Amino acid sequence: MRRPFIAGNWKMHKAPAEADALAEALKRALADVTAVDIAVAPTFLAIPAVAARLRHSNIGVACQNVAVEIQGAYTGEVSAEMLKTAGVQYAIVGHSERRQLFGDTDAIVGKKVQACFRAGLAAILCVGETLPEREAGQEETVVARQLEAGLAGLSADQVGTVTIAYEPVWAIGTGKVASPAQANDVHAFIRGWLGRYPSFVARNVRIQYGGSVKGSNAAGLLSQPEIDGALVGGAALSVEDFVAIVKAAAG
Ligand code: PGA
């Protein structure tokens, strides 16, 4: 059985003091949860405070992006190695906002996944189609292309440790959630796609759903056989909502 994994993407919210307060509240509220892997992704700036707060807790720290390179003249970038030394364990890579607003192409996303392995961060690779792509029936083609590029060059053992987040772009921040069946269908497609590797890969890889997950809809999504967790945006900023989502995953 795959262990459920709930991650909160705080996006560009919460300066260090506020991020620390949210981390502290989550740490208290979730201290007794043992059956779920949990992580939160603050801004780069708030990572040191949150990592210090969550040390020796059951909540891991994720970053929202990594640089391709290790170090050098790359203004505005932060490398996976630097994030690792700051106490980060997981990295969200290829989020649709990075792809749409900041020019992260499929090829760049693949390089960022490689950077995660180079530095020892656990990658959460985001994939998902836009509304026009879904309306044209292209969701599987798009997701397959993103998987192919995102996982290029990795060994089967490495792919087996990646988390995939299926996030239909039309459901992100829109309040328009994919139905449990709609999400499960694409998750099943992703797991089938992983069948090109030895069978342990598809068995082990966790596939999170992301896109307007809230306390009120989490149980329905998480009860689907192919949905192993959630990548949560807006609702991850609310202690009440995020705790409800984690508890739904704990069953
Ligand atoms: P949302 O964001 O939960 O606010 O829709 C999800 C995400 O972007 O990961």
Image (cartoon, helix red, strand yellow):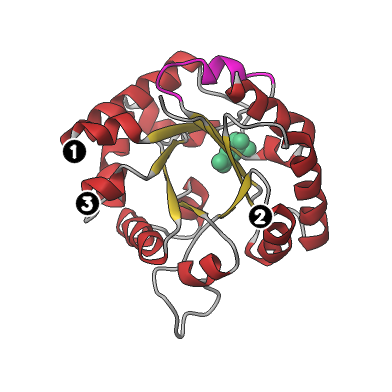
Mark in the foreground, 3 or 2: 3
Q: Residue drawn at (33%, 62%), measured in percent from left and top? A: 111
> Which quadrant of the rendered structure holds the C terminus?
top right
Q: Residue at x 80, y 48 (%)?
A: 24
Q: Secondary structure at mark 2?
A: loop
**Residue at screen point 66% across, 31% down:** 33
Q: Residue type at mark 2: give it.
A: Pro
Front residue (pair 129, 66): 66
Three-letter code for the amino acid on which mark 3 is drawn: Ser
The residue that label 2 is drawn on is: 42
State the residue position of label 3: 155
Using the image, tell me which numbered label, if any, was put on residue 197: 1
Q: On screen, 113 above or below 76?
A: above
- Give SS at disc 3: loop
Sooner in the amino-acid sequence: mark 3 or mark 1? 3
Q: Quadrant of the N terminus?
A: top left
Q: Could you classify mark 1 by the number of other residues whose Cα lies within 10 Å: few (under 14), some (14-19), or many (20 or more)?
A: some
Residue numbers of the magenta segment? 216-227
> From the viewer's perspective, is residue 98 above or below residue 26?
below
